[in-house]
Amino acid sequence: MDKIGKLVSSRLERKPNVRLHSDIHALADEISSYFGERGRFAMYLGAIKRIGAARARSIFAEVKQSDARNPRKLFFWKTKVQTANKDGGPAGRPLPARRKSAKLTHRKRPSQMKLWPSERS
């Protein structure tokens, strides 16, 4: 007969998650589990890819040690600040150049319109 310790330890062993392919995936899983947002794994994975695994790990350690009211917001604020400092510009993607609406480019200006039949040629 097996000892009860072996039975308990065999039941408590965690199976590795086969969906975690790299260190970055494991870190994203750890962070999303810590914040209780397993469904937002991709959001955390994107943030980690943007700033790097080493920096994300240090930010996560800072957030765990802090006494913040909302540690999730603090984590993403710190990743945003890190991205801004890394690129030397504002965080996020640059805004696209504005273009004129196609509808307005084909219309005539009111000064070019001929309103009366006598003005038409």
Image (tube, helix red, strand yellow):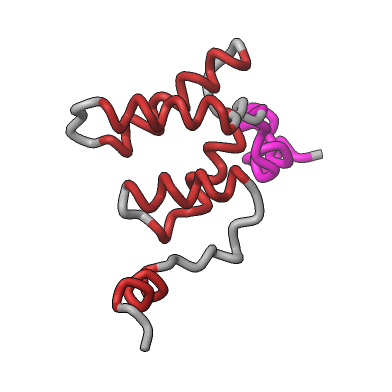
Viewer-nearest residue: 16 or 25: 16
In the rendered image, residue 35, in percent from the top left (x then y), is placed at 32, 47
In the image, residue 54 sits, relative to residue 26, either above or below, namely above
Q: Which residue occupies 31% across, 72% down?
A: 5
- Residue 18, quarter of the rendered image: bottom right
Measured as percent of width and height from the top left, residue 114 is found at: 68, 37
As drawn, 77 above or below 8? above
Residue at the right extreme?
A: 121
Farthest residue in the front direction? Answer: 1
Residue drawn at (48%, 45%), measured in percent from left and top? Answer: 44
Residue 81 image position (x, y, % from top left)? 46, 19
Q: Quadrant of residue 59?
A: top left
Residue toward you, 102 or 65: 65
Q: How many marks?
A: 0
Left or right of residue 37, residue 28 in this image: right
Q: Is residue 14 above or below residue 70?
A: below
Image position, residue 29 (x, y; %):
47, 52
Instruction: Name the one closer to the observer, 112 or 14.
Output: 14
Q: Which of these two is toward me, 73 or 100?
A: 73
Q: Is residue 20 magenta?
A: no
**Residue at 17% over, 33% down:** 69
Q: Which residues are magenta?
A: 97-120
Find out whether residue 119 is within the magenta segment.
yes
Query: In the drawing, does residue 8 fall left or right of residue 108?
Result: left
Q: Assign the N terminus to one quadrant of the image.
A: bottom left
Q: Quadrant of the C terminus?
A: top right
Q: Residue at x 28, y 35 (%)?
A: 71
